[in-house]
Image (tube, rainbow, N blue to C red):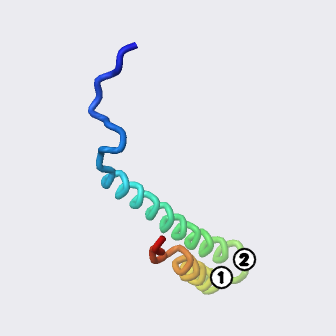
Amino acid sequence: MGEQASDYHRGEMEIQEQLATFDLFMGLTKWGSLAIVAVLLLFIVWFCTPGGFMAGLISAVATAVIGFVLLRAKPEQAH
């Protein structure tokens, strides 16, 4: 079998656009998941427990703050 003609040469192409797309996707996934969890917690506590709206709001805000602190970007460490 002969070799296929291709513009691709391993290790020679720029991947900055792929890295930017991956970083955007991971960020949207991470922060979107946190938002969904906070909203679900608000509604579950509000409608499914006797705690009511304020208990749901407090628990949702607390979850969002803790999630923000845990999920924010960490500074890069030198290797």
Local crowd at mark 1 within 10 Å, few (<14), some, or many (≥20)?
Answer: some
Q: Nearer the viewer, residue 44 or 23?
A: 23
Q: How many labels does the image show?
A: 2
- Going 65% across and 71% down the picture, which residue do you hit? 44
Q: Do the residues labelled 1 and 2 touch (CB within 8 Å)?
A: yes
Task: Name the residue carrying label 1.
Answer: 52
Q: In which quarter of the image is the N terminus?
A: top left
Which amino acid is tagged 2? Thr
Report how far apart the C-alphas of labels 1 and 2 lie in the structure: 7 Å
**Residue at disc 1, secondary structure:** helix
Q: Which of 23 and 59 is in front in this view?
A: 23
Which amino acid is tagged 1? Gly
- Going 60% across and 85% down the picture, which residue do you hit? 58
2 is higher (above) or lower (below) than 56: above
Furthest-front residue in this view: 79
**Residue at disc 2, secondary structure:** loop
50 with respect to 17 (left or right) = right
Q: In which quarter of the image is residue 40?
A: bottom right
- Going 43% across and 57% down the picture, which residue do you hit? 25
Q: Which of 76 and 40 is in front in this view?
A: 76
61 with respect to 19 (left or right) = right
Furthest-left residue in this view: 7
Local crowd at mark 2 within 10 Å, few (<14), some, or many (≥20)?
Answer: few
45 is higher (above) or lower (below) than 2: below
Q: Which mark is residue 49?
A: 2
Q: Residue 76 carries which label?
A: none
Q: What percent of the width, then of the height, locates residue 9? A: 32, 37
Q: What percent of the width, then of the height, locates residue 28? A: 44, 62
Q: What percent of the width, then of the height, locates residue 76? A: 45, 74
50 is higher (above) or lower (below) than 37: below
Q: What percent of the width, then of the height, locates residue 3? A: 35, 20
Furthest-right residue in this view: 50
